[in-house]
Amino acid sequence: MVTRRLTPDVLDPQLRRTFRFFPNPPVRHGWQRRLTRAALTLLPNPETPPDVRYERVDLGPGTAAHVFTPAGGGNGGALLWLHGGGMLIGAAVQDQARCTSIARELGITVVSADYRLAPEHPFPAPLDDCHTVWRWLVAHAAERGIDPARVAVGGQSAGGGLAAGLVQRLHDEGGPQPAAQWLFCPMLDDRTAANRELDAVRHFVWNNSSNHAGWRAYLGQEPGGDGVAPYAAPARRADLSGLPPAWIGTGDIELFFAEDRDYAQALTAAGVDCTLDVVPGAPHGFESLAASTDLARRYVARSRDWLARQVAPDPGTAGA
C-alpha cells in the first residue's frame, strides 16, 4: 500500500497555516485515549456572558445536559447539540463557547449532551444517552419556555452521526419529533472505515486509521460487515422518508466527504428537504479549528441562518 499524503496546496489558502502540520488525534491505543480524555477534564469552562445562563443537569453515569439559556428565556426554539470525538474521546465542555454563541445569536436554548464513550461503552450506550437528554429536554420544555415542535438536533463529526441516528430512532418511536437535523461533517457510515485503501491517504485532522478505531470500538465488531444495528450507522438506513429537514456541511477534502454527500443525496431522493454545503479545500472540523478565518465565519453564518429558519417562532418561515 502506497501512502499518499494530502499536500498543503489542496487546502484553501486561509487554512494552510492551521492545518499544514495538524496531527490526527491519538485515539488508536487505550493509553492515548486515556491521556486525551484526562486533558479534556482539565479544560476550564469558558466564562458565560451575563446574557446567557448556564446550568448542568446530571442524568446518569456519564450523561449530562449542559443548558445555555439566553436572557429573557429565548424565543421558544431550542437545539440539542452533540459533541464530536470519533466515538472515543470528547466532552461537552469542548463546545461550550459554540453553544453560548448559538444561544446568544439565535435567541434559542441550547442543550449540549455529555454521553458515554466507546470502547468502554459501545453502541447503543452513547445513543441511549443522547436519547435520555432528548427526553429530558422535551419533558421540561414547557417550564423552560420551549416549544417542543421547534427543537432541532445537531452535532459535529461523531456527534453529527449520533444526531442523525437519534433522528431516525425518534422517527420510528413516534412522539415529539425534531424540527430539523443540523449536521457538521457527520460520521455516518462504517463502510468508509472498512475500505482500508483509504488508510493510505493522509487526510488532515481525521484519517481512516483513526476512523476504523472509532467504528470498531463503537460497533463492537469490525466495521463494514453484516449485523450492524439500526441507528448505529445512519447511512445504512434504506428508508429515509419522513425525516425532518436536514443541513449537512462538509469539506471536499475530508475523509467523510463522500458519505456525507451520498447521505444528503439519499435524503433528497426520499423527499426530505436537505441542504448540502460543501466547502472546497476544507478539512474535517475546520469551522472549529480555524474559526477566525473568513471562510469558517461565512460557513457558520450560512449554517446558523438555516437553523434559525427551522426553529423560527413563525412556523410559516420554516424551510423557507
Image (tube, rainbow, N blue to C red):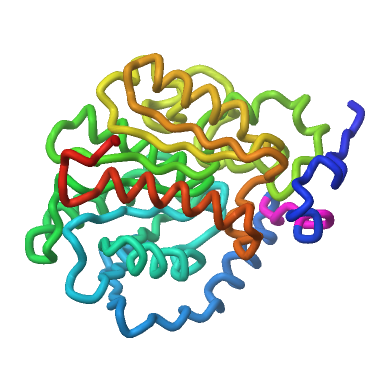
All told, the count of numbered labels is 0
**Magenta highlight on residue 284:** no
Q: Quadrant of the N terminus?
A: top right
User: Residue 282 location, x and y as percent?
Assistant: 68, 44
Rendered position, 82 above or below 257: below
Query: Visible in this render: residue 313?
Result: yes
For this rendering, which residue is in front, 260 or 199?
A: 260
Q: Please tell me which residue is depicted at 61% across the width and 72% down the height of the picture.
A: 39
User: Residue 272 location, x and y as percent?
Assistant: 33, 23
Query: Visible in this render: residue 125?
Result: no
Q: Quadrant of residue 320?
A: top left
**Magenta highlight on residue 24:** yes
Q: Please tell me which residue is depicted at 35% across the width and 16% down the height of the picture.
A: 270
Q: Main secondary structure of the magenta part?
A: loop
Q: Residue furthest left?
A: 142
User: Residue 302 location, x and y as percent?
Assistant: 47, 47
Q: Please tell me which residue is depicted at 25% across the width and 56% down the height of the picture.
A: 78
Rendered position, 7 above or below 223: below
For this rendering, which residue is in front, 289 or 167?
A: 289
Rendered position, 18 above or below 199: below
Segment tinted magenta in the rendering: 19-27
Q: Quadrant of residue 26?
A: bottom right
Rendered position, 92 above or below 174: below
Left or right of 95 in this view: 31: right
User: Residue 13 location, x and y as percent?
Assistant: 78, 51
